[in-house]
Amino acid sequence: MRFLIVLLAAPAAAQVSMDTLNAVAWTQTSVEYRASAMQAWSAARRVLPQALKKKSWTAALEQTGKFKKLPPAIIVDIDETVLDNSPVQARFLLEGDGRYSTKQWEQWTSEAKARPVPGAAEFLKEAASRGVTVFYVSNRGAKENAGTKANLEAHGFPIAAEARGGLGDSVLLREEREGWSGDKSSRRAAVAAHYRVILLCGDDLGDFMPARKPREERDKDAAQYMSWFGERWIVLPNPMYGSWEDTLSGFDRSLTAEQARENKLKALRRD
Ligand SMILES: [Mg+2]
């Protein structure tokens, strides 16, 4: 009884959502995570000679017009594709309420301390040495520009200083130019206007095609391109977050942790 009284008298402890714990622990501690990432970049390495040689080869749905004579480019996403941000996910759990916080995120990216995703830097350096321009199409915001570039450069990721078509350097962040929304299609189109895009690499469906739509539509649209994965499209594992998760909550980020969890439970199938 005394125990109960003490409990009731104590101030309400902040609710920490532990929904991402398993995903973050897997990413940080498992051999299986590192092996999956290595496997993705080995697939990229295997396909590179063919993609370079075959001038009719393109990986971008936005690639239109004559592109056979354009120089080759690879478009990669940054977060959970070439940089591992699982430490900020750990901070959300250990120092926050367990959910995404812009303040904690921007603090993390300003520190420029993310480690490279296993295999990413080696592959992209090899591609650059073979004459491929590497574009980083990321939904990090413009104010994260300096930290992002410093972080990439610290690990030797190749960045082109002056890309063709007046694109500036090859790190293309969200809203850096008018029309560069979170949907990455417009930035892929901007690259494809001046380069033959030979590979797309990412951890989110949005890194390959528009992904902000209901689940049935995503499933249907992606199904047409399943044979591209492991060839033109290289997908990296990320169980921690992504548009797959937003899809389950109708892209409503205002939901409480409980409501989001309820939506996930509803999405489960038992047979
Ligand atoms: Mg990503």
Image (cartoon, helix red, strand yellow):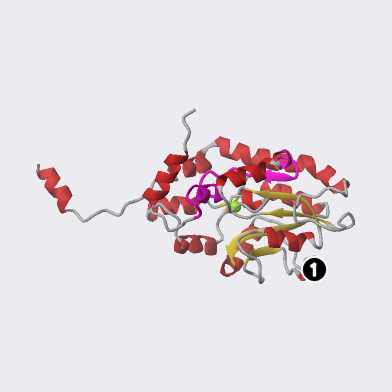
Q: Is residue 102 left or right of residue 16?
A: right
Residue 248 among magenta residues: yes
Coordinates of residue 227 in the picture (x, y in percent): 73, 38
Q: Is residue 140 left or right of residue 61?
A: left
Front residue (pair 98, 126)? 98
95 lies above or below 232? below
- From which residue to which does the magenta span run? 227-251
Residue placed under numbered mark 1 in the picture:
165
Q: Residue at x 59, y 43 (%)?
A: 237
Quadrant placement of the N terminus: top left
Q: Residue at x 69, y 44 (%)?
A: 234
Residue 19 showing in the rendered view: no
43 lies above or below 12? above
Quadrant of the rendered image containing residue 97: bottom left
How many numbered dots are placed on residues in this image? 1
**Amino acid beneath label 1:** Gly
Q: Regarding mark 1 in the picture, which secondary structure is present there?
A: helix
